[in-house]
Image (cartoon, rainbow, N blue to C red):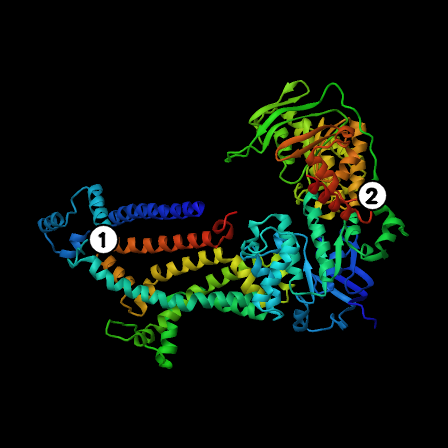
Amino acid sequence: MPLLLKLLVQRIALGLLLLLMVSVLIFWGTNILPGDVAQSILGQSATPEALANIREELGLNEPALSRYFDWLGGLVQGDLGTALTSGQDIAASLGSRLKNTLFLAFWAAVVAVPLAIFLGLLAVRYRERWPDKLISAVTLASISVPEFLIGYILMYFVGVKLGWAPTVSMIHDGMSLGQKLSSIALPVAVLTMVVLAHMMRMTRAAILNVMQSAYIETAELKGLTSFQVIARHALPNSIAPIVNVVMLNLAYLVVGVVVVEVVFTYPGMGQYLVDHVSKRDVPVVQACGLIFAAVYIGLNMVADIVSILANPRLRHPK
Amino acid sequence: MSDALLKVRDLKIGARVYPPGEKPRDIDIVHGVSFDLEKGKVLGLIGESGAGKSTIGLATMAYGRGGVEITGGEVWVNGREILGTSLKDLRQLRGTEVTYVSQSAAASFNPAKKIMEQVIEASIHASKFSKKDAEARAIDLFTRLGLPDPETIGDRYPHQVSGGQLQRCMTALALCPEPDLVVFDEPTTALDVTTQIDVLMAIKKAIRDTGVAALYITHDLAVVAQVSDEIMVLRMGDMVEHGTTDQIINAPKEEYTSDLVSVRSRKHEGKPPSDNPVLTIEHVTARYKGTNFDVLHDVSMELHAGQTLAVVGESGSGKSTTARVMTGLLPAREGQIVFEDRTLSADLKGRARDDLREIQMIYQMADVAMNPRQTVGTIIGRPLEFYFGMRGAEKHKRIDELLDDIEMGAEFKDRYPAELSGGQKQRVCIARALAAKPKVIICDEVTSALDPLVAEDILKLLHNLQKREQVAYLFITHDLATVRAIADSIAVMYQGRVVRYGTKAEVLSPPFDDYTDLLLSSVPEMRLGWLEEVVEHRKMESAGN
């Protein structure tokens, strides 16, 4: 057990270190971006004095290093700062947005992950035959089309022509779960189509990789059906690579939804981020960037930990 | 139809092969084999690799491995013809009526599942026993197979038990659903001789206790003689001879069978060591990088020109590690390596090219010791260029000579390793080692992966080359029959130490130390009743203690 514990502590420590490095990158990156907050707040007609005043007021004249540590100190205490443009507390306005983004990502994952693994198993079961080829073709086609295009196509056919789902995915706290789900049906469908192929193909490849093993032959010679052999004997040995790709896609569901949120005018983090990038509101962009990075690092860390735990040699040392 | 449990009639099996650079073609593996097996009897299938033994064994479950396909004939199990039945009916037969024990239990157990779960899976799947009954049965089998902690061993994962134990677990897996027929496919081949004897006895007892019929597949006639009632000798997909075990061992009718029987009887007079050893290692201690325990403790041995030192011991005893220390691949922590009269650097990097040239190696797996994308000529030519700077016609002339030395013709020069047989590949590796004109060649289990008759030819070749070139061999092996056939001196290793060292006559004559005695008495002998004798002898000894 100490070995396992050591590995886990190592992973978590590495994750935190990585997050710290990312915070440096984000801070540095947003500082070299062109554009001037003071200018965008006051508009083109502002006088140089007014600009200088507002810069002083916002603390933009401080050296970068001290601003970074101020920012970092706030972060550690859960203070993301205030938006330059509106003066609102960022943590408060991000909170509900993040909740909505996670809500959308969660339901997309609930549909996409089991479906992808099931299709992967099915593709292995009928490998090199028409079901395998059909699954590959459909999922590859759906990943190849840009997601905003899939979004508009679904909107037109499912939303407008058939009228099965709303084309605008507004949700608010007063809605019941059922109403919320029906509201996000189309973005969930789009996200599912985008992430399905990657996870399905990895599942297929990982399982095919262990199908050559001698223990698969043992299982076949026990009289199990092909599907039982794949699900009971091959899948548990392919967990590590599958979890890795699943986590990567979950991260994408949180971080990469910007376009889909904008297309469906969904009140998530993506829209919030896009709004504030256009306003040159640096603290908001930094906060969003950091949250996205934390989600990415966190999920990949979970993938690493699951891979470690999935290895019986590490879980049960001699 | 008689009431035989298993009837095989004119069984024909084929496969599609994909030779490199050619179109795929279909070949026949088994051409019309027939036999019967009655309830409770054991039939041994014996032959070299490619004889079709495993293929026939799996055909009794109507299973073809890889691209193997059963192309004709009939297989009757319990009065039902199984080749023509549906996959659904076959699934009811597999794992319950007929079960299979494979060569490598380590690979055949699913690493992600507990042993018990895998042992009882087939019984539960076929609804033959309830989970509780199946587990009770499994524990009973674990006990009868002599496994330690039979009550709890099933809760372990496969990597948590030893190879010999896992092989017995595999036997329990096969016997758990109360099958009528068990196919044992080389169940002890991957084990050390000292472990093999326990597993062999456990299998034999389990067969007798349960009254199950068995097909016992092996290339080792001495092993099959201990467990089977009848033996069928196969060669290249044809039956050579089929008779009772007694008749096959003591009065073989066919020449091929008598070759197999006599293959272990090669004699070799040991030579006494000379005064000037060519290579000496003195008090060597070594450990692997990143570990904090020694794998070799105070190992010393001498190699003499024109002589063979055999290093024997079970896996993990430090045989190959000793070779790695000699070559400098694993630098010794303490001790010296002296070549002729100069001390060699412990580390490979500190040795001159000429020092490297003097010590060459031949490996067990000839397949992976050669670059599959280089021709035989390139492979043999490389040391000629590297050590002697040979080019052009001179090099080609030398390659031809070397090919001639290993009894292969110049026409092999342009072939790729994949186009050679196992024995031919090993010959090319020998030629590559000889090309450097070394004084010492380290042979690491060079015949272990080969069939007995092919292995014997390789030993003969090595012996003839030694006589002519006066090269010294360090011959690493776990097979004592090979030792008798080639060694002048012997070092017995156990847990990283040399426990016995001397000329062949000294080492192989009593009085023995405990380990050498165990090792020597574990080597299967080609006579009936040997297994019982040894086991009885050991019981009496331990009772006497």
Query: On what subunit does the disc labeled 1 rest?
Result: A
Residue that label 1 marks? A78
Which residue shows up at 61% across the image and 69% down it? B129
| Residue B432 image position (x, y, % from top left) | 71, 35
Residue A114, quarter of picture:
bottom left
| Residue B243 image position (x, y, % from top left) | 86, 57
Marks 1 and 2, how far apart at CA: 80 Å
Residue B315, quarter of picture:
top right
- Mark closer to the observer (1, 2): 2
Location of the N terminus of chain B (image quadrant): bottom right
Q: Is residue B377 visible?
A: no
Residue that label 2 marks? B263
Q: Pick whichever, A247 or B386, lies toward us.
A: A247
Judged from the image, the secondary structure of the residue bearing numbered disc 2 is helix
Q: Residues within 10 Å of mark 1 (few under 14, many from 20)?
A: few
Q: Pick whichever, A92 or A277, lies toward us.
A: A92
| Residue B77 image position (x, y, % from top left) | 75, 69
Judge if badges 1 and 2 mark residues of a common chain: no
| Residue A176 image position (x, y, % from top left) | 28, 75
